[in-house]
């Protein structure tokens, strides 16, 4: 320790380095990889929606029973999120995403051999869920490693993959189904999803591309800092700790409000897409016309995911306020979408909903980053997905049961409209609660100053 102190004294100044995310460079290659992964991860959900009515006929089941396939796929993928987060901490985003692509593809391909609904639930539901969950968390984490300042823009590119997938694949999948049937569609789409591994291969460790920023410190400051660092390193070597999942978030009341706002939005975002094609068929539209609505909505999502972050970045609007306003407007548009009868109005309201939801999907990630920080973001995503998984798991059968009882999906979409408004009100309460806490802290500081 004496030698270390002597060495510090001999140096008039010292250059200290800090590792920073690249904020570009290879990060844009990573963005392209996440975009490819999100594009291909969307295929199971799109395919399920297009094939839902035929699945009910082929396997002789009801809408609520068939909905368990997608509910288990989406819900279970969320429930395993904490485990995926720990796996990423123990290995890497690239390995986990690569393995997830193989599992997701295998689940769809094995569905070709299903002869009953239970087998289809196990393959198309459970196995694809594991793969999807591994990919979904991996891409969110790798983006947070490569971008901090431009996180909103990078997340927009990542999430645009979902929109591009809905723009390109509905008509293609419908054409494949008409040519090769239900089981042939499983084989072809499963092989297509195997290309997730190509995108995962681009997820190089961020330390290979990190920027180093330096600052000069005077002798005394550097000596003190150097000694503190040596002390902390010694303590760390004596008592090593490895944190895979930060459970301290569970002791933060504000985190529960964030989760309570995120869950209704995530629920609506998922099932408004899954049930869109069956909803169009219920309204009497042709199968190809109903499938094309997904593509039309994708255009609105792309504008919302990619274009809006650039505009909001320039305007410097508060993300929380934007989220609240869009949530309330989306709920109103959802009601018009659910009760309309004409195809043109159905398409127009669908595009507007997609634009609003696409914008809010970016805001929700950005708000979570602002509230918990980049260090705790992977754990926050894992825990939020865990809580959301419970509701998503029950959501499909519930909405399917409503369709079986009423004979259409109008009531189901009105329920989703109410949930979208609820998401905005929860965040409004969060903003009010934070304001009250800040006001209380200021009052205490004033009293302490007087004393």
Image (cartoon, grey):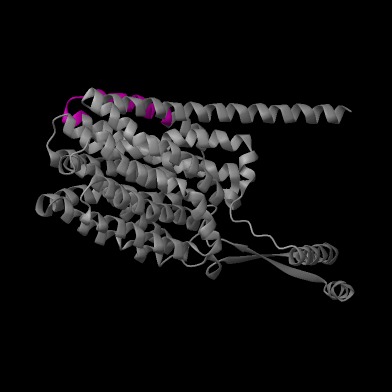
Residue in the picture at 46% in, 46% down: 79
Q: Is residue 92 visible?
A: yes
| Residue 371 to residue 169: above or below | above
Is 334 contained in the magenta span? yes
Of 139 and 386, nearer the camera is 386
On-image quarter of the C terminus: top right
Coordinates of residue 443 in the picture (x, y in percent): 76, 26
| Picture coordinates of residue 26, whole percent (x, y) | 46, 66
Secondary structure mostly seen in magenta is helix
Q: Position of residue 174 (x, y in %)?
A: 16, 48
Q: Position of residue 351 (x, y in %)?
A: 28, 36
Left or right, 76 with respect to 108, comes to: right
Q: Relative to residue 269, is residue 405 depicted above or below?
A: above
Q: Quadrant of residue 29?
A: bottom left
Tell me: 373 left or right of 68: right
In the rendered image, residue 342 lying in the magenta stretch gets the answer yes
- Lateral position of residue 162 relative to residue 53, left or right: right
The residue segment tinted magenta is: 327-345
Quarter location, residue 439: top right
- Whether residue 409 can be seen here: no
Question: Which quarter of the rendering shows the N terminus?
Answer: bottom right
Residue positioned 21% across, 25% down in the render = 407
**Taking 282 as reference, is 439 left or right?**
right
Q: Residue at x 77, y 70 (%)?
A: 14
Taking the spot 49% from the left edge, 33% from the top edge, the residue there is 261
In the image, farthest residue toward the left = 179
């Amino acid at each position: 320790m004496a030698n270390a102190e002597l060495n510090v004294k001999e140096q008039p100044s010292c250059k200290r380095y800090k590792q920073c995310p690249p904020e570009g460079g290879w990060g844009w290659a990573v963005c392209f990889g996440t975009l490819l992964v999100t594009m291909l991860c969307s295929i199971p959900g799109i395919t399920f929606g297009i094939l839902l009515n035929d699945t009910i006929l082929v396997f002789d089941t009801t809408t609520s029973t068939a909905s368990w396939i997608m509910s288990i796929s989406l819900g279970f993928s969320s429930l395993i999120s904490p485990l995926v987060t720990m796996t990423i901490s123990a290995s890497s985003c690239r390995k986990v995403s690569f393995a997830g692509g193989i599992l997701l593809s295998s689940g769809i391909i094995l569905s070709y051999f299903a002869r009953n609904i239970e087998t289809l639930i196990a393959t198309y539901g459970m196995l694809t869920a594991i793969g999807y969950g591994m990919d979904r968390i991996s891409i969110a984490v790798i983006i947070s490693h490569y971008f901090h300042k431009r996180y909103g823009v990078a997340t927009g590119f990542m999430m645009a993959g979902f929109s591009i997938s809905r723009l390109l694949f509905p008509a293609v999948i419908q054409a494949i189904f008409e040519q090769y049937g239900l089981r042939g569609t499983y084989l072809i789409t499963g092989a297509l999803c195997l290309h997730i591994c190509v995108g995962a291969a681009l997820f190089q460790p961020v330390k290979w591309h990190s920027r180093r920023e330096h600052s000069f410190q005077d002798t005394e400051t550097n000596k003190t800092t150097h000694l503190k660092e040596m002390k902390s390193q010694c303590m760390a070597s004596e008592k090593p700790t490895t944190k895979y999942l930060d459970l301290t978030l569970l002791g933060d009341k504000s985190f529960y409000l964030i989760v309570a706002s995120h869950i209704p939005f995530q629920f609506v975002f998922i099932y408004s897409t899954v049930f869109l094609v069956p909803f169009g068929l219920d309204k009497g539209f042709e199968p190809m016309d109903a499938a094309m609505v997904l593509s039309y909505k994708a255009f609105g999502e792309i504008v919302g995911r990619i274009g809006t972050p650039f505009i909001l970045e320039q305007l410097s609007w508060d993300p929380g306020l934007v989220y609240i306003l869009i949530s309330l407007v989306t709920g109103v548009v959802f009601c018009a979408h659910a009760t309309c009868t004409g195809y043109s109005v159905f398409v127009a309201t669908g595009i507007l909903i997609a634009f609003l939801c696409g914008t809010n999907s970016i805001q929700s990630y950005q708000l979570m980053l602002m509230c918990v920080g980049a260090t705790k973001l992977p754990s926050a995503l894992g825990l939020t997905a865990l809580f959301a998984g419970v509701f998503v798991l029950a959501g499909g059968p519930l909405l399917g049961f409503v369709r079986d009882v009423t004979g259409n999906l109008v009531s189901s979409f009105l329920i989703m409209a109410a949930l979208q408004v609820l998401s905005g009100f929860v965040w409004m309460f969060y903003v009010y609660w934070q304001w009250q806490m800040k006001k209380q802290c200021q009052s205490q500081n004033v009293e302490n100053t007087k004393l």
